[in-house]
Amino acid sequence: MRIITQLAIVAALAAAGAGGWYWYSQQEAGTALKGAGATKGAGRPVAVVVAAARKEVVTTTVEAVGSIQANESVTVTSKVSALIAKIRFDEGSMVKTGDILVELDASELRATLSEKRAQAEQSKRLYERSLALYQNRNVSEARLEELKAALESSDARVRADEARLEDYIIRAPFAGRLGLRRVSVGALVNPAATITTLDDTSKVKIDFRVPESVLPLAKPGLTIEAASASYNDRKFAGVVRTVDTRVDQATRSIELRTEFPNGDGALRPGMFMTAKLSVSSRPNAIVIPEEAIISQGADHFAFAIRDGKAVRTKLTVGERLVGAVEVTGGLKEGDLVVVQGLQKVRDGVTVQLQRPEPRAAGTSS
């Protein structure tokens, strides 16, 4: 009985071993078939959409912000302390160089000036009489010199008071538009008091700061386009007049002074402006669609089509445009690059070129 049991156990083990070997052989056969199918599929071309590298005019621009300054600007004040006798201007009016704005009360100075003029006239008569007597030697030369010095001193005092009298008449130092009036007739003004403001806004200046990397390209004569939130889509064209001689050590930026014509007076001092400065233009730059670029850290690549295969090509990129990128190295005009199907492409894979699918009406790029 024990022998029969042992034989049964041996038979069961043999059957289990045979079944296991059959299952393993079937699994190996399936894996081999799958591998063969994968190998066969690897040779199929990958369908991609491509675009050609083309030449375009590319302009390098720098964005900056700044505030408007008048071409000439001054706060009108008095050089002396005195009462205001007359105000001869209207707020917001245009004036010419030399126009009288304010007259101060100079009655006391005029009285003093009249007295000094009389003294000067008396000194002149004495000198002329002595000069006639000196011809006959009735007056000494020393006395004549003394009277001459007295005459010159009197004339000098008169001229000094006449100059001071001019300080009581406040004139426009240049042509421009006046601001608000800050004083009234009869008010006592002093050199610290503001009477009004005067701005020449026939053209305006804006100072912009740009990175020092722009310094080799920044020069007088460059064109600049500015905009203000006050005028929606209106653009103002200007020009760079001066480049500062120093680079700011803290910000590593340099200041540019620009000038904008302002014939219609739309631009006012103090307005905030955003600007784009065109620092260079390249008429034959190579450009490809932005979707063709693959970025890895600081490096940029694209799949270029060479002999029917996609070749991973390292690029040197330049200016970023709307929907496109300038390529300064790695491609030439006419080279084809993959723009759709990048997720299926690998370096060296055979590709099948397809036309881009037409966009539905109303879709955006």
Image: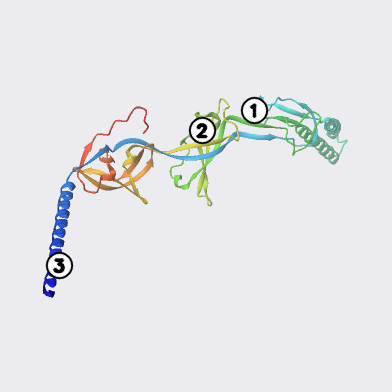
* Closer to the eye: label 2 or 3: 3
Where is residue 101 shown, x and y percent of the image? 72, 28
Q: Quadrant of the N terminus?
A: bottom left
Along the line of sight, which residue is nearer the eye, 141 or 150? Answer: 150
Please state which amino acid type lies under the numbered disc 1. Answer: Arg
Q: Distance between the residues labelled 2 and 3?
A: 91 Å
Where is residue 285 shown, x and y percent of the image? 33, 38
Tag 1 or tag 3, which sits nearer the N-term? Answer: 3
Q: How far apart are marks 2 and 1 (CA)?
A: 23 Å
Where is residue 187 shown, x and y percent of the image? 80, 32
According to the image, label 3 marks what residue? 13
Choose top left, top right, bottom left or bottom right for residue 60: top left
Q: Which residue is drawn at 63% across and 34% down?
A: 73
Please state which amino acid type lies under the numbered disc 3. Answer: Leu
Disc ID at residue 229: none
According to the image, label 2 marks what residue? 227
According to the image, label 1 marks what residue? 177
* Closer to the eye: label 2 or 1: 2
